[in-house]
Image (spheres, rainbow, N blue to C red):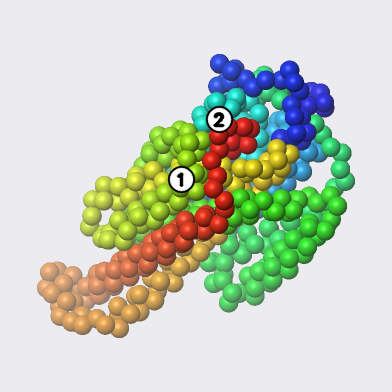
Amino acid sequence: MSDDRASASGGDAQPAALSPLSGVQLWLAAFGLALTNFIVILDTTVTNVSVPHIAGGLGVSPSQGTWTITSYAVAEAITVPLSGWLAARFGTLRTLIVAVLGFALFSILCGFARTIELLVAMRIMQGLCGGPLMPMTQTLMLRIFPPDKLGAANGLWGVTAIAAPVIGPLAGGWISDNWSWPWIFFINVPVVAISFTIIVAQLRPFETLRRIERIDVVGLVLLVLFVGSLQLVLDLGREYDWFSSQLIVWLAVVSAITFVAFVVWELTDAHPVVNLRILRHRNLAVGLPVMGLGFGSILGLVVVVPLWLQSVVGYTSDDAGQVMAVQGVLAVLLAPAAAMLIQRIDIRIIVTWGLLWQACTVVLRMGWTADAGFWTYATPQLLQGAGLSFFFIGIMTLAVSGLPQDEVALASGLLNFVRTISGAAGTALATAAWDNATRTTRGEIVGTLHGVEQAAGQLQGAGLGSGGSLAVIERMVDAQAATVATAQVFGGAGLILAATAALIWLVPRTVVTGGPVAAH
């Protein structure tokens, strides 16, 4: 692979003779890149429902089993913002190929691990390899598509990014139940083999120029400490009762201090590992918090819905998974339409519609009761999917519009970094809010109960003992408290989504009429 290609990170110019792909070659290469992006995002959620299987298989507690999730998330979150530097230092295609091979290797080693310590170590390595894959696939999508097909590129990449988090828990649960937990990692290998073969065969001419720059060791260490501490706070906070735990307090302090130090260092260093000066672009500076608030709220809803269905309605994991799965139907079907619209109308309108539509679906959930039917629960999920494509593809496009090509990979890395961190934060905060609201509401309900003895007497007359009758009443109170708490969390998420829709109007009017950056 020659080094005399375009500049790294989506450089200034490709060789004059190098044209975008077309026909079968184009769609084959696009499929390989999309498949790579799909499998790495899938692995962020595939272990979520498999933790009990993993814990049982390794002879550890479920809380120890969750480290398989935390370790991958921390490692991925660290390497995602480094993507721009990696592309500049080693070349976009080289980085992608090495990361793909590493991801496959460590997937195999995860499946063979027979101790929790080894599994966590391999998950860390898998996450380090998986982090750069999302920005690298985006950057190469930008290079291979001609301007008149950028809408299709947006739709294809968007489908993988939207569908993978929904499919992950379903696939993980089914594989763990019907095969065994190592197969949630082994299944990556044939998928990666297909994508690797396509990438090597089709994308060799699209390598980027390498720039030999010194390694910003201080910035890298600060990034690792900041991200690692923050991720541990989010993942362990609920288990350790948040800031009542000295461990969580210290982790939060370390995260805050290293974050400030990281920002100051990166803004003043001559060769930063993450060039924060890119935030001078208003589209990106506003796009990052919009991505964080919007995606965090959406992930919060995704977590709370199955929690309530399983703890109150009595759904099994499979039943709850089916309710959640319909969310991907309209998201996938409408992704191409969203991608095409961004080249025709103001993208702020598209993002706003996507956010407000999802806020409206929250209202449908706030009236849920425990005795409703499947489609009462599934319909809001189905409708929410219609807004996912417009929000996700719209904000990714809007945030990088107007950026120089040599900054696109860095911007993409930052967007995916914020998406990763906000997803973890949304999950942790929504779960904590749900727990706290349930406890508070239960106390309020208990304080206003009347006629408990009469109700218990009636239940005893129906054949229940005194203990059984009180247990039934207690379960009814718990169910009601959890239902009210769920509605409160839904309402909070809806308000955040609506407020985020207003935030997007801080950027200037943007219409993408073509050009390489539109591929994002």
Q: State the image coordinates of residue 104 (x, y, percent, origin top left).
A: 65, 34
Please indicate, yes or no, whether residue 439 appears anywhere in the rendered image.
Answer: yes
Residue matched to label 2: 150
Tell which of 500 and 185 is nearer to you.
Answer: 500
Q: Is residue 462 left or right of residue 496?
A: left
Tell which of 42 and 348 is nearer to you.
Answer: 348
Q: Amino acid at mark 2?
A: Leu
Q: CA distance from mark 2 to mark 1?
A: 17 Å
Q: Farthest residue to the top: give it.
A: 24
Q: Amino acid at mark 1?
A: Ile
Q: Is residue 58 left or right of residue 88?
A: left
Q: Is residue 445 left or right of residue 385?
A: left
Element class at badge 1: helix
Q: State the image coordinates of residue 440 (x, y, percent, origin top left).
A: 39, 76
The quarter of the picture where the C terminus appears is top right
Query: What residue is rendered at 32% in x and 68% in y?
Result: 484
Query: What residue is rendered at 65% in x and 73% in y?
Result: 249
